[in-house]
Amino acid sequence: MSGHNKWSSIKHKKGAADAKRGKVFSKIAKEIMVTVRASGSDPNSNITLRALIEKGRAANMPSDNIERAIKRGAGELEGEVLEEVTFEGYGQGGVGLVVQTLTNNRNRSAAEIRHIFTRHGASFAGQGSVLRSFQRKGDIMVDASKVEEDKLMELVLEAGAEDMTKEGDEFEVITDPSQFMNVVDALKKANIPMTQSEISLLPDTMIPISDKSKAEAMIRFIEELEDLDDVQNVYSNFDVDPSIAEQLSK
């Protein structure tokens, strides 16, 4: 399985999440509300909620924001009714995309996403046609300068992780969703800080783009989708060829 890719690393280095922190908090809050409505407000029994709380903390989301989202999801505070709608499609070069939304108007979301797809020469695909090439996994990133590789490897595998690799200046730990919190708790207990911890969709294989202008166009495409208020996550098997990765990270 392919995990964290060079495009994700580039985005991380460019600080895209920090530049849009308010939007990040809003999107995490929406996810919390939906999972609480579906599976309850107890993080001990709702693994997805517990993972989202960790995701919020990793993004420095204030505890009050997290608590309000849980209460809205539980009906203790008034909140809008949202539904999950997933769109799938293909970009140039056969790159697959899965766009997850939380929306109170699926027609509006579809129109906005279709507009961006059309502008970038992409097209929608049938339900499940792209998604079948992705797997739901726990995805944890650790700063490589904060821990020795052998120590981290032993710790996470003992806690239930499936795999660990190094990408640039970070280690990526992959887990089955059911083991995600076991690994997160083990890292916390060992005082090993995480730069990212979430349950994500990871592609089985990657499609690297070696042409700089085409890679930049794909990055713009993904970023435009992520900027839409209704879009929670954009997953893709797009990757940047190592020969141009460093140029794009600047």
Image (spheres, helix red, strand yellow):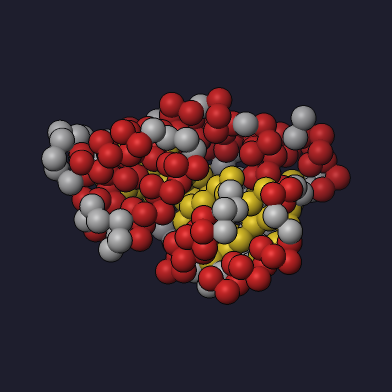
Q: Quadrant of residue 67?
A: top left
Name the one closer to the observer, 158 or 120: 158
Looking at the image, residue 229 lies above or below residue 203: above
Q: Residue at x 35, y 60 (%)?
A: 47
Residue 114 at x, y percent in the picture: 45, 37
Q: Residue at x 59, y 45 (%)?
A: 195
Residue 163 in sight here: no
Residue 161 at x, y percent in the picture: 56, 69
Q: Is residue 231 left or right of residue 189?
A: left
Q: Is residue 170 left or right of residue 46?
A: right
Name the one closer to the observer, 13 or 188: 188
In which quadrant is the C terminus drawn?
top right
Residue 248 at x, y percent in the picture: 76, 34
| Count of residue discs | 0
Residue 80 in sight here: yes
Q: Quadrant of residue 140?
A: bottom right
Q: Residue at x 59, y 31 (%)?
A: 16
Considering every residue shown, the one lying at the far front of the view is: 190
In which quadrant is the N terminus drawn?
bottom right
Q: Is residue 35 left or right of residue 133?
A: left
Looking at the image, residue 132 lies above or below residue 13: below
Q: Residue at x 64, y 45 (%)?
A: 8
Residue 205 at x, y percent in the picture: 65, 62
